[in-house]
Image (cartoon, coloured by chain):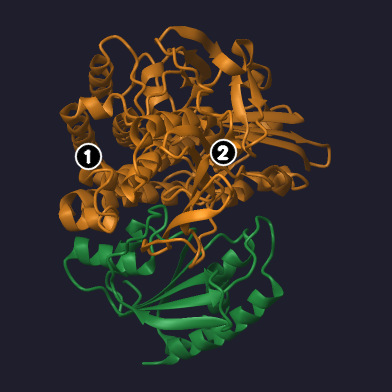
Amino acid sequence: MRHQFELETARNPEALKRIVIEPVSRVEGHGKVTILLDDDNQVHQVRLHIVEFRGFEKFIEGRPYWEVPVLVQRLCGICPVSHHLAASKAMDMIVNGGILTPTAEKIRRLMHYGQMLQSHALHFFHLSSPDLLFGFDSDVARRNIVGVAAANPDVAKMGVLLRKFGQEVIRVTSGKRVHGTGSIPGGVNKSLSLEERDYLLKDADQMIAWSRDAVRIIKTLHRSNPALYDVFGDVPTTMMSLVDDKGDLDFYHGALRARDKDGEVIFDQVSYQGYSSLLTEGVKPWSYMKFPYITTLGEEKGWYKVGPLARVQNCDRIPTPQAEEERLELIAHGNGKPMHGSLGFHWARMIEMLCAAETIKDLLLDPDIMGAELMATGPRREEGIGVIEAPRGTLFHHYRVNADDVVTYANLIVSTTNNNTAMNVAVRDVAKNYLQGHEITEGLLNHIEVAIRCFDPCLSCATHALGKMPLEVTLVDASGREIDRMTKDSEGRVGKGAA
Amino acid sequence: MTAPTLIFGWGNPSRGDDALGPALLDAVEALRDAHPEWGPVELLTDFQLQVEHALDLEGRDRVLFVDASAAPDDAPFRAAPILPAKDASFTSHALSPQGVMHVFTEIKRMPPPPCTLLAIAGEAFELGEPLSAAAQAHLDAALAWTKAWLAAE
C-alpha cells in the first residue's frame, strides 16, 4: 500500500539535484514545487510549498464585526463572494444566533451559486481546458486561453458568457460588480426587483444548456482516455464536504460528512460548530501552510480532500434533475468505487456548474427572492462560526467579538489548506510516474502543474501588478551549484540556460 | 447608452500599491463633474483583468487600462498604446490587457477600440498596507497625464 508520506522527505537530500518551480503558474499568489533528483534523474523528494494566508487573521482582528463580511473580500480576488458569505454566516451567529429570513437565505444562495457558476466556468474554460484540449506537453505558446479561443472559438465564447452571467448574478445580488455589500450580519440589504429577476431569468435556460454541453465535453475527454484520466494524480483518500439534512449536495449550508477512500461513511451530519475538535491543523517544518486532518484518525490516516470531486461523491443526491443524471454517470464510471484520479475534479466541477445553473433558475422563479423581509433578530452572542462550500472546497470562518463589537479572534481554514496534503500526494504521484528517469522538459514540468490545477488552489491572492508572476525552474547539483535554469516571464516567454 | 470612453483600473485596494489602479479611478471620479469637456466616461474596476472584461470594450471609442507596475523602473508611470496580442500569459486567473483585447477580437470577430495602457510604478504590495509615499507621488503624476488624455480629442 502506498504511503502518503512517500517521497515527502529524502534520506540524503544534500546529495541530490534540486528542481524548483516557483511560483507555480496559473494558480494564484506564490507557490513552488521542489523536486530532488539524483544523477540518474530518479525522484527522491517532492514538496509543494504554498505561502500560507499569513496575516489574514491579523488583518481582521481589531475591526468592528459588521465590517468583516465586506473586508474579507479583499483577501481573495478570485472568490471574494466565498469569504463574504462565510464571514456573514459566522456574524449571523454573533448578531442573532444564525437566523435568516427566507428572502435573505435565498438571496445569499443566489449570490453563492452565481459565484460557483462563474468560478467553475473560469477554471474549466480558461485555466484547465488548454491542457486538456491541447495536451499537457503541447506547445507552451498555444497552451492558454487565447490558444483555446483561436482553435475553438465557440468553446471560448461559451466560457466567456457563462462567466459573465455568473458575474451578473453576483452584481445584482450584492449591489456591485466587485466589493459588494449585499450580505450583512443577520441578513441581506437588498432583494431583487422584478426587473432584475427578469433580466437574469431570460438567460438562465441558455446557461443550463451550455453547462450541460460543458459536462459532455469533459465526460467525452475522460472516457476517450481512461488510462490517463482515471489514474493521473491518483489520491485515494477520505473525502469531506457539507451535505444537507437529507444527504443532498448543498453549497451554502449543511453539516459535515466524510467518506473513506472506498466510499464508506466515516461520520455524517456533524455540526461544523464543532470543527475545532473534529479537525486538527497539523504543521510540518518545511511549509508555512498547515496540514489539517480528522483528529480521531490521526495525522497519517486522517488527511482528506475537499472540493468538487469530494462533494459530488460524498452526497447521496444532487437536488437538480440534470446534474443528478450526470452525477449518476460519474458514479457509474467508478464501477462501485470512488474516483480518485485528480483529473476527475474537472468532471465533477462541470457537474457542479450544471447544478449551479439549474439552481439559479429555480431561485429566480421563487417569489421569496423579491421579498421585503431582509433581516432577522435574535440573541447576541460572542462567538460565531460560518462554513460554506466554496468553489474549491470547504471554507471555515471563526470569530470572537467583544462587548465593544470588535473582533478579538479570527481563524480561517480555507479550501486550499484543507487540500494541502492531498495536493502534495497528487504531485508526488505525478513526479514518480512521469518525471522518474527522464530529462526534465517544460512539458514534463507542466504535468506537475496540471496535477495542482485539478485542485484549483487559490493561494495568497490579488496582487497582480504588471511585471509580477515569473516562473523559474532551477537545477542545482549536489554541491549547491546551479547547473541549469528554465524561466517563464509574465508574458509566457520561455528562457533556458544557467544564469 | 455605452460611454465612448472607458477607464479600467484593476488591483486590490487592500494590498498596498496594488491599489494604484482603483485609486486613479477614484481621483478621476472626483474630478469629472468639473470637466464636461471629457464627455461621458465609464470607470470600471476589478481585482484582476479577466476574459469577461473583453465584453466591456464593446461600443467604446477609446479605452485606458490602468494598473500598478512592479517592474523596476525609474519613471513614475509609463503610458503607451497597446494592440491585441496572443497573450502567452500562464496566469489565466489574470489576463494581460493585450490578451483581453485579443479575446475581444476572437469572440466579436472585429478589432477592439483603441486602447492605451497606463502602468504606474509601485513598490510594496503587502495586505493591509496603504499606498506608499512613492506610489502616491507616482499617482499624482499619472493623474496629470490622464487628465490630458481625457481632454484630448
The amino acid at mark 2 is Ala
For the point 44% across and 88% down, which residue is it?
B149
Q: How many marks?
A: 2
Q: Do the residues at pointers 2 and 1 share their chain?
A: yes
Tag 2 residue: A15
Picture residue at 21% right of the left edge, 44% below the top: A133
Q: Position of residue A448 (x, y in %)?
A: 39, 40
Q: Left or right: A192 with respect to A359?
A: right
Q: Earlier in the sequence, mark 2 or mark 1?
A: 2
Element under disc 1 = helix
Q: Position of residue B134 (x, y in %)?
A: 67, 77
Q: The disc labelled 1 sits on which kind of residue?
A: Asp
- The green one among the chains is B
Residue position for label 1: A205
Q: Residue at x 44, y 86 (%)?
A: B150
Chain A colour as displayed? orange
Q: Nearer the viewer, residue A192 or A325?
A: A325
Residue B41 image-quadrant placement? bottom left
